[in-house]
Amino acid sequence: MSDKRYVLLGPPGAGKGTQAEKLCGELKIPHLATGDLLRAAVANQTPVGLEVKPFMESGRLVPDEVVINVLMEAIETAKKKKLSGYVLDGFPRTFRQAEALEKVLKKRKEKIDLVILIDTPDEVIQERLSTRRSCPDPLCGAVYNIKSKPPKKANVCDLCGKQLVIRSDDQPETIRVRQKQYWHDTAPLVDFYERRGNLCHVPGDGSLEEVAELILQAAQTGIRRKAPRK
Ligand code: AP5
């Protein structure tokens, strides 16, 4: 079991959730995904869920203070289980979140070991999000793709047998809002982590397996690839 801490960064649909799942399986560490935690809160109609629902449905970012609390709670829960390594997926997404995370880790004499940016072109993302299908059960949350990762039986979750759905924020207009939010609020974190010297660029347009292999290599060796020359 690894004690290293990773962040997967990238635009909506880059493959963060899919790759986090694979990396966590390899390294036997927890996958802490703020999108999944928030969707579970919405499905369970908790006070946090009721607060964040309109933000998520319209593709806007949830307020920093809410998502920071949700993530810190998840890190605490992992810590109580003596799990100090993890993969963060979908967090941080703003400077405020990145600074809050850094502050908490610093207090514990911990750090993020590697930030992996899944560099995926826009046209690939559009295609992936329009063909994504998700299990609606928050306890399962499996993600499929009718082209690249179809379920064994059409529209049925392999793991829990529920009918698969198109995520409510995977409508074309909402995808555009999420992408805009990414470029405005989250993309600047690439420079933030570049300056800290722990950012690795991984091209995200290969097959699921190719991207997974590159990410695992980066995580295991700590070798940091630079951005491709444009
Ligand atoms: P969240 O769930 O984190 O959404 P996201 O960042 O938009 O990312 P996605 O889940 O859409 O995509 P992904 O990169 O995980 O791609 P996936 O692996 O599914 O957040 C949802 C909402 O919650 C936000 O809009 C916001 O409101 C709120 N929120 C969450 N965190 C927040 C935060 N920190 N601050 C504020 N608000 C926050 O892959 C996509 C598809 O492609 C799948 O079908 C998959 O099978 C397929 N695929 C993946 N990789 C490949 C490949 N290499 N080849 C072929 N197909 C592939």
Image (cartoon, helix red, strand yellow):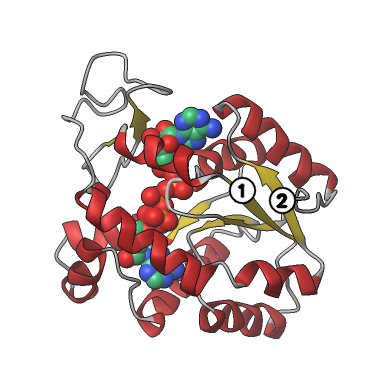
Instruction: Work out whether mark 1 precedes mark 2 in sequence or the reverse, and give the earlier one.
Output: 1
Asked which secondary structure carries label 2, the reply is strand
Q: Estimate the spatial distance between the alpha carbons at disc 1 and disc 2, rounded to whole Å.
A: 7 Å
Q: Say which residue label 1 marks.
A: 119
Q: Is residue 119 above or below residue 154?
A: below
Who's the residue at 41% across and 78% down the image?
69
Q: Amino acid at mark 2?
A: His
Q: Say which residue label 2 marks.
A: 201
Q: Amino acid at mark 1?
A: Asp
Residue 74 in which image quadrant: bottom left
Who's the residue at 54% across and 55% down the image?
10
Q: Position of residue 132 (x, y in %)?
A: 32, 35
Q: Is mark 1 within 8 Å of ligand 1?
A: no
Q: Nearer the viewer, residue 189 or 92?
A: 189
Q: Is residue 154 above or below residue 93?
A: above
Q: Are marks 1 and 2 in contact (CB under 8 Å)?
A: yes
Q: Position of residue 154 (x, y in %)?
A: 22, 17
